[in-house]
Each structure stands twice: as structure tokens, then as C-alpha cells.
Amino acid sequence: MGAITLSRRGFLKVAGLSAVGVGALGYTTFRSLDPVEAEELRSAPAELKYTADVMCPAECGIMVKVENGIASAVYGNPYVPYNAATICAKGASGLQMVYNPNRIKYPMIRVGERGEGKFKRVSWDEAIAYIADRLTAIKRDYGPESVIMDAGDVTDRDTYWRLAFAYGTPNATEHGSICDTPRRHGPKLMFGGKRVEPDIMRPLLLRQPDGTLKNDYSYRTKLIIYAGWNPFTATRINYESRGTVEAKLAGAKLVVIDPAFSNTAAKADKWIPIRPGTDPDLFAAILRYILENDDPDDPSRRYIDWSFQDASVGWTEFASAFRSWWRKTDPINGLSYFTPEWAAQRTGIAAEQIVELAHEYGITKPAALIWGMHGTGHHYNGYIPSIIGTALNVITGNFDAPGGVVDTEITKSDKGGKATGKDFLKREVTRTVDGKTVTGTQEELHMDRFGDWVAAWDDVVGDYPRRMLEGVTLRQGPFRGRTYPVKAYILRTGNSVITGSATWKWQEALTAKDDQGAYKVDLVAYIDTPFLESGMYADVILPEASYLERVSLSDVYPSHPMIWLRDAVIDKQFESRTPFEIMIALAKALVERGDPDIKPEDFWEKYAQEADFWTEALAGAPGRPNVGRPLPYPNLPEGFKLIGTPDSLEAGRVEIDPENKTIRGEPVTVEWLREHHGVAVWPMSYHRFPGGILKTSSKKIEFIWDWTETVEGEEKRFGQYASYNKLIEASGNVPPPIAALGWQKYPKTFYWFETKWNFHTNPEYASYRDRYPFQLTSGRIHHAMSGTQMVDWLGRFMVEDTWLPINDATTYDEINIGPDGPTPTGRKLTIAPNTWALGVIQMNAADARGLGFKTGDLIELETPLGYKARGKVNAVETIHPGVLRVAFGAGGRFSPGLGKNFYFKDVTPNHNELIDPEALSPVMGQPAFADMLVKVTRV
Amino acid sequence: MLVANNPDVLAGLDTDASRRKFLSRFASATFAGLVAPAVLLTEFERKGGPAPAAAAAPADIVPLPDLPDAIAGQDLILRMMVDLRRALEKPIEQRRWAMIIDLRKCTGCVGCTIACVTENKLPPGIAYRPVLTETSGTYPNVSRRFVPRPCMQCDQPPCVPVCPVNATWKRPDGIVAIDYDKCIGCRYCITACPYSARSFDSGYFYSDFEGGDPQPYETVAAHEYNTDRIRRRDAAPVGKARKCHFCIHRVERGELPACIVSCMGRAGYFGDANDSTSLVSELLGQPNVMRLKEELGTEPKVYYLV
Amino acid sequence: MTLSTPTHDRTLLYAVLSRLVSYPVTTDLLRQVVELDVSGPAGRDAAGELRRMQDAISALGGADAAIEVLNREATRLFEGPGQPLAPPFGSFYLSGGTLMGPEAAAVRGAYLDAGFLPDPSVHLPPDHLSLELGFLGVLAGRAGDGPDAQMESARQAWWGFIAVHLAPWLSLWQADLSRAEAHAFYLGAAGFISEILEADLAWLDEHRPNDGKAAERG
């Protein structure tokens, strides 16, 4: 060491510092690393980490490239058979959601009125306190049931439900309620399931004759019919993209029934344009044709595989109820119900084509008849095609048959279990009703199932605005007669102001005030990553960690049991927190305020870290029985419930419980998934019924839904509607939505009623035919769900005919979501013409010509109820005349968090501005998004 | 310590301490520019320059996914990755990369377009592989076809001879490459391409349109042509021509191009056309193969199945 | 040669400087600023900047009254929305106006070279000024304690970090603050930080071994 020059300059001294004083400032500390760790981090190359997508509810397995702590690219996970290494445009552009400048960065509290979009940044402590103070007061003054926990569109909601149930409210919901509940109804009634999908998920893991498990890549389907379903654009069931085209190349025929020539129709051997809302008519005609023409002795007419009767109950009654309509005459056309001629008049499809379709469907085996979100799910009477479609798949012998259809709800792995907190719903609670003290369970305070919507197992978000304005009245169960207000609405990863029924109705409900000038709904909390319209109406906003920053599990729909992990691949950005952290923080804050129902041993004492919660949620995986052909585990008892990792089950490292009929291997944990490319896959099999996968009360396919039988000397009531009818019988209160149909209770078997706002099929609307000549349907732009439009990459490309780069040159004053919410930045920006995609109104070209419109003209749509929306016309050949298609969530977006789309809100249509908020489908309350009539004028 | 080796920094500090403040000496933009590239670059940035077109060392090739054995068909990704490894063992001049797009399977999802954008960190205004949509007919007899259009990597590329500075050339393995450092941005090649497959990088960032600073996904290094470059307004490839290069940086590590691996319809195939046992060679032997604008004699290496 | 007390104090001062540019502004922080004192002729400029901050606090009516105004101002200058007026990140000024650019990676590398990383609960880019100042505090602590070789290495790293990762852009940042008409408190804060760093850089430069073997030891 050489000489050191004496300093000419002294060290600059600063006085007034003390270790204690400075320590209190809360500055960032650095942690020391050991040299090995430091070196590893220094030279770390790019890593590929496994997690699950959230850009749409398909939640495909993905691999994210992470370099220097930054997520730099997204690929499909090849180990997850559901998407098998594929990834769609939305999944690939997730980086622009995670790193979006408009992402909510910090907790915020509203300043000003709801809807003004004025906020100020606050600390987490302050935001949590704000929520906890109000929840505590609400519980004390009104009861915890006055709080709605709406866990929105993303399916990893178990932490929020647990908190809500523990707090004491049964009113916890998620996206399903406004998605497509009528579509799910048939499978629910008949299988105890939900989602009928074609057997085209490849690879399929199948047990081979030699005992090994191998991936089968072959296709067996000979005919796929998609009615009102567009899987190539709504890539929610990922494998239906590659599966459909590969099945076609392997010899399958594809028929697409849709008012619009969708991307899926572009690959169809036959596109059958149909009038919106007439899918039930077509399905009924197909069923009638098959029943009338089936001949087991004629190979060219052998439509029905009668063996289904051995595995079902009630077919005779169902068929009889169905046939009873043949004797009736439809007042709208004077024809006998369900004949091809009758269906032709109603659907607009030629009778010969209907007959051809029915015959082809009946005679081709195996075949898959699939109905979709918009076609059935969004119509007032969508239950009917769902029921008929399910019945058709069953009687033609295609249910759970190779190449046929699979109900993926009852074949998927269990998740959630005890972690979700549903046990809290069984807690005994006491309330005063009409001066009397009544005891019941927490569940029996549910605003829908013990209110007006007895059969709504998915809750009724579409009817929340009415209850927010008028309060809840319970009409069923022990607490009937009790009323309570809705005092809090906590919305997480959802955007009900745009998607939860009519936008204006939600705005009205969230801004309504009482006589004292206070908001009726005392607390509105918004928890999310993007800043959507519903956030504009919140009192408090919490930044939730994006899907690349948290651990959780998703609702997925493969053909056989598999489950994959969502894992944190990058650090939480800004001050966002995971759902787990938010759950714990709120639980702690409530306990601090003396909440008697939330216990530390159910929250932070139970789950030391995020992974622990999700490991408990995995405890029951897969939870499906060892049934079917080929038997998934030939070395384990048939029919027993399987629980445990694939490798432990495969190796026989299990404990068998003959009493409970379970096979218990080593439990699936978050750690196990992390060690296995993020995914666990159990084998596929077919013919997994009767018993087996079915979740009906009789363990058979049920064509009747409320009946009594003597079992071992006891009278037992069976059927999916039985429990609801019991409630109605006890109370004497018929739920108003079904009373409107003339029902006294939920029907025993097949039923029929007309949809709303359709003058082709419902005489009630005949008078609108001339003045409101267009049927308005919704459609899906995969790229532009309510929550992902701020992604630049998805805004530059055309999608079908509803999303088109057709903008005028636009200059605007930029608004960004800053620490204090929507704030002008002072920048003026310009978007060049025809470079940015807008939601447009798809109209038949001949219709457009007749009205003097051409593509790009700004038009206004108006409904008979007087609601209006504007947008540019897209005049094309690819849609049925007399029909307009406006994609869901594609326009009128008034949150600045939407990025560039915000600046086009006045020239793009909000479909939900136009719907009838009273048109909630009668059994489950789903808004009838696709039932509406409009007239068109030029702007 | 990096700084100790930088003569400019040391020179700046050794100047006699007069009244001038140290910090202002460092503050000039020139100095910042000097310090930044020389001193602040991390390891991977200092590599610089286009890599020689050599085979990746075997150690650099990514492992194959460990999937269950296949029966009644094959895992197409696995098959193509195995084909790729065989090709990489050959000398580069014996490989001939080809891509096949099965138009019967393309569902028009635009996933390949976006996968490419994220893989190559493309800025606003550039898409190497857009999907063309062709609609025809009158209601109800309409049809629609989706045609993804990457660079054709022509065997007779019209873009190569027009370049005044020889910044673009056809490699021995068939890829038509661009040297971003040589390119002067004259755009002759963009005009010459009959497929409109080339684009000019005008230097936009997404934050030019939507607030905030350039985001991490646009500042992480792209790995085109095996050179790590972080996109800056004042450096290549801004101001240069750009196009699809079959993700050759992935291919030489044994990974398929991003568009191929991501495709929702499994409609893309990739491999060595000089290998008669490869999947692409098998498919090329079918009667329903076509190429775009055959009549121009460009000899594209992108084929379509119809 | 051991240098102890002066640099230990620096750890505390750097912590305060770090908090001047991190969220939120608290009354504790402002009270601490009011208690600081720089003496001596060499500290004249630094004292002037410190006084600017202290006067600004008084003019706002004291620590309690000032935090609302200063928090809003900090948000306006450092956070956004959209592009902040004076983003306190190295990448912005040194890597072509980017967030998490190559400068951020280089700074992270410097942390790792020294064997440290910011506490995982902090979610700021590594080149955020508050983290960089905090890091200097860590190095200053090491420079005043321990075996000679470690202290010397820490001094070298401390000098190098200021020279390479702070000096090139601090005055550019100050210029942006001035252009944004920042509150006198923040003009003072930026000035004070600048003066301290300059003083330390000069002092460290004089205490580097000048035997030509700096490059090997570096």
C-alpha cells in the first residue's frame, strides 16, 4: 500500500443526526448477501418460470421469460395439455398489462363525488382502515349480510370468499353470474355439471393396454356443431382452436350456426345463419325430428342409442312433456311446435336445411353438439336450448364417449376445499324477523337464493342494482320476511358498471343517496390492477398484484383432471399486494376493531405465507373417481375417489379407505407443482357414468328434476330443483321471476317459454317490428374484454367485423392514472387515421345500402326503452340481414385507465347501454344481453 | 471495478480542482454519452456486433420438454424440436430453413403476430408477421381466409441486390439477414420486397402514445441475430430496416420460432428442408402446397398448405 | 489508516438524503431536516442549500403543516401521472429516457458486487435515487469500520458509485426540477444532495491510494 496524501480538504461534517432519530424515518435498508448468492444473482441468465395466465378466464399455463427481474416474453407451457405450448394474442401481450403506465400503483381514496374520478394517494394502512372501519360499523348497524363481496372476473377468488364468509356474509360471488348461466343449465340439471365441450383436447393422457400412460393425439369426432359459439375468437376453451381444425383434417365435419360469419364459421363446412334468439327453436326441431324418425332397425335412421336409459332416469316423462307441445299451435305462426316448418318460420332457416342438419346429427357418430355463450347464455330463455342440447348429446350416445362430448365441469380437478371458507356458511346465526327471534344458518341470509332467485346457484349480479336501490327482502327459509339494505359493495377484478347489466342502472345504484344525502351503498371498494369504469365509482381503491406477481389456482376446463399453478415470477410492482396479503390485512384490521367472528387461527395463524393457503386449496386434488374406460388406475380400486399427486398414485404410494371409498396418495402442494413444471396431470377415461363423475342426486342422468322415491323404506326427494321447490312449499312465496312465467314452482321436466325482445318468436313484441327492425346481438372480441383494452398490441389489429382500425385522426389531451388517480399529463397526442381499432357495429351490407350507410359512417342505435348508443357502421356480407352485432365491452369506455380507447368513447358503442336491465333470465337471473331490438339513425 | 479502468473518467477526475465543481464536470451530455456506453454496459451489452453465422455450441441448446410418450399421432412441437437438433449438428451451409403455414388450420387469432412482437421487442408500427384477412362472396355465401405473412426468406430475394451498402444478404442456411449497423435506412429494400415484409423503424416507443416512461418490455434487450440490443432512440435498429428472420436466435438454441410454438391452431411448421426425414420435408411432398406470388420467381422458403 | 467517525455519520446522513426523495414526506423527516447543521467554510454551499429547505419548511408553517403540500409536490415531480417532471432514476437520464434501462441493470450489478441488495419489501427500480443514496450509506458504514483492506475497498466502491452512477446525471435532474418550478424545498433538497455528494467525491478522491495500483485493487 503506497503513501496516502494527507487531505487538504476536510471531511464535510454534518451535525444533528442521531441513530435513533434517523432510525425512526423508515428508510430502505439493504440486506447483506453471502458471496455465493451474490455471484449467482450477478450472473443469472434469463429464466423461464411457470405460471398461469389471466388475460382471459381460460387461464392457460404459461412460461414467462424473466431477465434481471423483468418479465420479457410470454410463451405457452408445453407441459399443460390444456393449451399444450400454445398462447393466444392476449396471453402473449400480458406484459402490456403488467407494465402498463395506467396500472393502479398505490392505494387511493376518493375525493369528490363518485363517478368524478378524483382520488388521492394514501398508505395501505389508511386504505385498510377505511374499509375495516366501515365494515365494522355495517356489521354492527345492519348485519354482515349487507356486504357484497364480488370477486369479479378472475377465478382465483378463494381468499376473498374466505374473508367474506368469515366476516359473516353469504353474499360472495364471482364472474359466472353475468357470464352465461343459461348455457350451463342443461348440464347442471342432468349431470350436476356445467360445461359440455367436444372431445378434442389433445394430447389426452390415456392408460394403455400395456399399463403405461401415453399421450393420445388422434381425433375421433366425425361431426362438430357449434351453435352460437365462436371458440376461435372467444378462445376461453383454448384447445377448441387447434382441436377443431385438427379434427377437421382428421375427417370431422364442422357446422357453425351463428347470425354472424364468425372466425369459427370461416372454417365450417357449413355456416347456417340463424336469427338471434332462435337457437331453442332449432334445437327443438332437431329433437322432434330425431324422435319422430329414429328407427333402431334401419341403419340409415338409427339416431338414438337407447342404452342411455340404463344410466338415466325420467326420460319417458321428459319425452312426454316435450311431445305435449306438438299438439299445440304457436300463436305467432299457427304451426305445430317443433316441426321443421315451424322452426323454419321462426329461425329463418329453410325447413329442408333443418331436416338435413337433424338427420346428419343423428346419423353421424361420434358427434358433438355444442352451444355457446352468446347464442344461448345471453338469452332470456337460454335454458331451453341448453336442456335440449344436453338431452340430444345423451340420447345420441355421445355423452362421455370417445369423439363425443365431455362435461368438463365434472371431470376437472377439485380445488379450494376448506380454504374457501364455505364451512363458515353453516354457522348458526340469529336475527329478529317481525319482532321474533329466528335462528338459521349464515347461508340462509343469502340475498338471491333466499330472496327472489331461489335457483340461482351462481348468484345474480345483474340484479344487484335493484337491491342496492330498494334493499333485500328474504322470501324463503327461516329468515323470510327479513329485509336488509346493501351497504357495501366490494368489487375485485370485475367491472360491473360495464358488464354487470345496464351501465346506467349500475351508475344510478352506486350514486343513489338517501334522504340525508349520504350514499345508500355506504362503501364501494375496488381492488384490481387496471383502472376500469367501476373504479370511478369507488370510495377506496386497492392495487392488486398482477397475475405475474401472485400465487393462486384457476377454474379450468380440460377433458380430464389436471391442475396448474399460478406463481409469482416477478416482484410485486409499485405498492400492489396479493389477494392473500389483502385478505390477511383486512382480517387483522377487523379483529383489531373487535370483530367477533374473524379468528386469527383461521387466518394469519393458519397460513404463514401465501403458498400455505393454496396448498390447502389443493388438498383435495383431483377428487375425481377412478372410473371409466380405460380405467385411470387399474391397480387401485375402481369407483373410489382419487386424492393425491400423479406420481404417488401411479406408484401406489397410497392409503385406501374402504369405508369412505377414497384412495389417498401424497397430497398435491404448491411445492410439488413448482417441482413439476407447474402442473399435475391425471389420466383421461371415457364412459365415466352412471355414478362416477355424475353429481346428480340419483347418480344417474336426470331428465326429471323434482321427484320422490322410496329408498330403503324412506321417502326421499330427488332432482336438482327439489331443494328449491321445498323452500317454496314451506314459504308459499313463488319467486317473482318464475311467477312471471306462470310457474308455481320449478318444473319437474321439459319446459318451454319464449324469449324477450324478439318479434320473430314472441307475439308480445310484434308491434316493434316496423319501428325497431334490427335485432341486436352481442359478440366476443377476444382481444378486447372489458379488462384488457388498454393493451396497445391488441388495439392495432382487426378482429372479425366488430373491431376495426377505422379511427379518424384524433388529437387529445392525455389523461393517465397517476398516484392520485386519473390526472391530465399536459401532453397533447395524436393518433393517425386508421391505425387504431375501434369497436364497430356490424351490419349486413344490403341493409346498410338500403339505409344509405357505408362503412365508417357514425350511426345511433336506439331501443324501444329509449336508450341510445353510437358507433361506426361496418357494412359487411358476413352477417344475417336484420341483425346488428356489437361486441361486449368494445365501446363507450369512459375510464381513462383504458388508455387510447378512452379517447374514442363517444364514437364507439357500449352494448350494455342498450340492454333491458329488467330482462333478467327467470331461473338464474343472467342479464339477457342479446335480447334487444333497435332502430338506426345517422348521426 | 469498472470505473477504475475508464480513462475518460479518470481524466475527468485528475483535472485540477479549481473553482469548477466536480459534478458539473460530469454533467455534460457528451460525458454522459461517453460514460454510458463504455462504463455502464453490463456484460451482455458489451458483446456488440453481429455474431458470426456459426452453429451454437451444443451446451447452449435448450433441453427438450420431457413429455409422456406419444401414441396415435405425435407431439408436433417435440417432433420439430428433434428435427431442429439434427439440423444443428450439420454445418450451416447444409441447412435450409423452411416454414410451412397450414391455412386450413389458421384460426386468425393474431397470436403469432403478437408472440413475434414480444419475442423481438418490436416497437409501435412494426409487425414482422401480420395476418392478412381475405373475405369474399355475398351473404350468405361468404368465405374468409387468414394468411399469416412473415418474411419469405426468398432464395432469390429482390431486397438483397438493391441495398447500396450490402447491409442485407442471404445466409448459407437460407435466412435473409440485416446488419443493423451497416444499414443506412435508405428504404430501397422496403420498396423492393413484393410481399411488403420489411419495415422501417421510425423510433417510436409505446410511451409516445400513452404516457409514462418507456416500459420494461420495450427496454429489455432483443436478441435478434444473436446480438443483444436494447432499443434506444439514438441507436440501431432505430432508423434501420427490419424484418422477420425466423427467430434465428431461438433456432440456433434449439427452440422453434416464437410464431410457430405459440400458434393456437398448431398451423405452423418449421425445419430443415434439406433433411428428407424432417416434418417440413414430409409436408412439402403434398399436393396442396403453394407459395405466394410464385410467378415473380422469388422462390420463397415459406410455404402454405391449402 | 483508519477513518472511522466521519464516515459512520455519513450512513445516517445518506439515510436522511434517501428519505428526501422517497414516499412519503413525514413530520419526522422534516423535523430531522430542521435539526441538521453544516458548519465550516468548506460547507458553505451545502449549508446554503440546507437553509433553503429549512426556510421552506418554516414558510409553510412548520413540519406538521408542510407535509400535505410537500407530498403533493413530490408526487408531481417524481411520480407522475404519465411521465414525471423530474424522474429520480438513473436510466431516465443515462439510458435514453427509459425505465429499468441498462443503467438500472448496471446499478443492480454494483449492489451485487458489493454483496448487497435492497430489502425485498421495496419495489422501486434499483436506480431510484433513494436506493442509490441508501446504498452509499451502506458503503460509508463499511468504509469506516473493519480491516483496512475492506475499508479501502469500500471507499473505492463509494467513490466509484458516485462518479459513475450519480455524478453524470444529478445536475441534469436538478435542471429538470428547476424547469418544473419545483418548490424551494425540493430545489434545496436536490442542491443539498448534490453538495454532499460533491464534497464526498472530492474527499474520497484524495483518499484513494495514488500509487498507480488503483486499477488492480478496483
Image (cartoon, coloured by chain):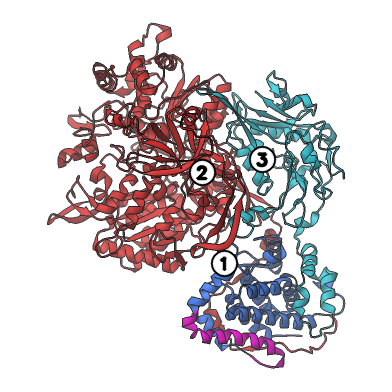
**Residue C44 belongs to the span the image colors magenta:** yes
Spot occupied by residue A90 in the image (x, y as percentages of width and height): 56, 43
Find disc 3 in the rendering and name its residue.
Answer: B258
Q: Quadrant of residue A731?
A: top left
Which span of residues is magenta-colored?
Answer: C38-66
Q: Chain of mark 3?
A: B
**Residue C128 belongs to the span the image colors magenta:** no
Q: Farthest left residue?
A: A435
Find disc 2 in the rendering and name its residue.
Answer: A784
Spot occupied by residue B203 in the image (x, y as percentages of width and height): 71, 53
Q: Which chain is cyan?
A: B
Instruction: Please state if B111 lies on the left or on the right of A136 as rendered.
Output: right
Q: Residues within 10 Å of mark 3 (few under 14, many from 20)?
A: many
Q: Nearer the viewer, mark 1 or mark 3?
A: 1
Pointers 2 and 3 in contact (CB under 8 A)? no
Spot occupied by residue A355 in the image (x, y as percentages of width and height): 40, 14
Mark number displayed over residue C146: none
Q: Look at chain C in the picture and name its colour.
A: blue
Q: Quadrant of residue A661?
A: top left
Question: Relative to A8, is A700 above or below?
Answer: above
Same chain for the residues under marks 1 and 2 in the image: no
User: Residue at position x 18%, y 34% from top?
Assistant: A744
Can residue A628 be seen here?
no
Q: Which chain is red?
A: A
Q: Nearer the viewer, residue B99 or A78?
A: B99
Q: Nearer the viewer, residue A370 or A524?
A: A524
Q: Nearer the viewer, mark 2 or mark 3?
A: 2
Q: Nearer the viewer, residue B70 or A131?
A: A131
Find disc 1 in the rendering and name its residue.
Answer: C79
